[in-house]
Amino acid sequence: MTPPLPEIADAGRLTEALRRSGALGEGQVAEVTVENAFSTLLSRITRLRLTYDGAADGAPAALVVKAGLPDAPGRLWEAGRREVAFYREVAAATPPGLVPRCFDAAWEQESGAWHLLLEDLTATHEVATRWPLPPTLVQSEAIIRARARFQAAWWDDPRLGAGIGAWQDAAATEQATQRLAAQYASFAEVLGDRLPVARRDLYARLLDAAPRLGARYHAHRQMTIVQGDAHVWNCFLPRDGTGEGARLFDWDGWRIDVGTDDLAYMMAVHWYPELRRGAERHLLDCHHAELLAAGVAGYDRGALQDDYRLSVLWQITTPVWQQANGIPPVIWWNNLERVHLAAEDLGCRDLLDG
């Protein structure tokens, strides 16, 4: 049975939303047709075709509705709430051409229901590959440069933590570390002898060193907005193959942090060693060059490398968090293996010796 459309797909509500966003003048939505619909792990994506009555020059012929799924993983972090906040607060203040345009965003605290009304990029853009196939090097360059342009737009912006997002204070960091320690204890118990002693030792040392390693974050310098769930399938690339005009999407995990967190998530968490070793340094070079071209100053290539190694070290906690929040093993188990191999390659254990 086809699930019911979200309420926003009603012609009257679409008319109101499009007028409110400046995308529709005196005309009105006359008919709404479902082009296609599918579910992801956390949401339902529905593509709508619109027809109009009256003056509707420039109004979108198609839209995408992204809405929550009942009983989906993510209930512990209120899936959808942060992405709605992103499109209301961040996307609205971001230079155009970096994220999809949003015409409406709503999240209800009582029910947890949420939706986004986004521009339809089907005709002009596509995801590089079908998961889990990695992209080509040329596609990876386009993704990494798009990410750099977005990060540069928010680099050390005075609005960070003062209207856009929030800084985590020392008390909140301590609580987060305690929560991570509890999640790790459960994770280690579930895995048993499938989690080697050397890796158990690495987690123990990371938790012990967390206050010292957290100093990089609490300095609040050379920081930006990161996507969080920054894998390569959360970027639309232009179908013409130019790489110009890529759009980053799926922002439920955004936060203020070190920009290399997204790079480590993209490569160290998701790529097997041979692919990562062959592309990693080149892509980091591309990212740094794009940051400089976009106006970022006082952040040399060595600083980016130092941040990247620290980000990879922290990313060994990603599978722990994923398992604790109901993400299936087909995702977190493979992430666990890949990120630990990356941490070994980059000598991340050495960061715990300071």
Image (tube, rainbow, N blue to C red):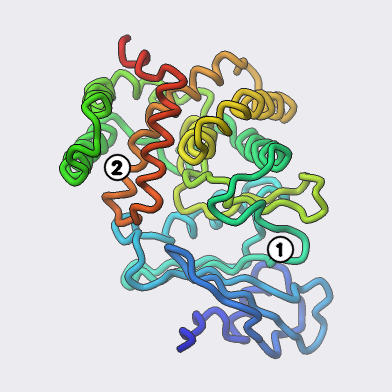
Q: Nearer the viewer, residue 269 or 191?
A: 191
- Reply above or below: 55 against 296: below
The residue to which callout 1 is attached is 121
Query: Measured from the top left, where is residue 153 in percent x and y?
Result: 65, 37
Q: Nearer the viewer, residue 22 or 78?
A: 78
For the residue marked with disc 1, what is the amino acid?
A: Leu
Which mark is first along the chain, 1 or 2?
1
For the residue marked with disc 2, what is the amino acid?
A: Val
- Reply above or below: 261 against 46: above
Query: Measured from the top left, where is residue 150 in percent x and y?
Result: 64, 40
- Reply above or below: 184 against 111: above
Query: Measured from the top left, where is residue 345 in percent x and y?
Result: 46, 21
Residue at the image point whose x is 71% and y is 66% from the top: 122
| Image marks 2 and 1: residues in contact by CB distance under 8 Å | no
Q: Which image quarter holds the N terminus?
A: bottom left
Drawn side of residue 351 relative to residue 161, left or right: left
Residue at the image point whose x is 34% and y is 52% from the top: 329
Residue at the image point whose x is 60% and y is 56% from the top: 130
Q: Would residue 136 be seen by someone viewing this image from the given angle?
A: yes
Q: Nearer the viewer, residue 139 or 6?
A: 139
Mark carried by residue 94: none
Mark carried by residue 320: 2
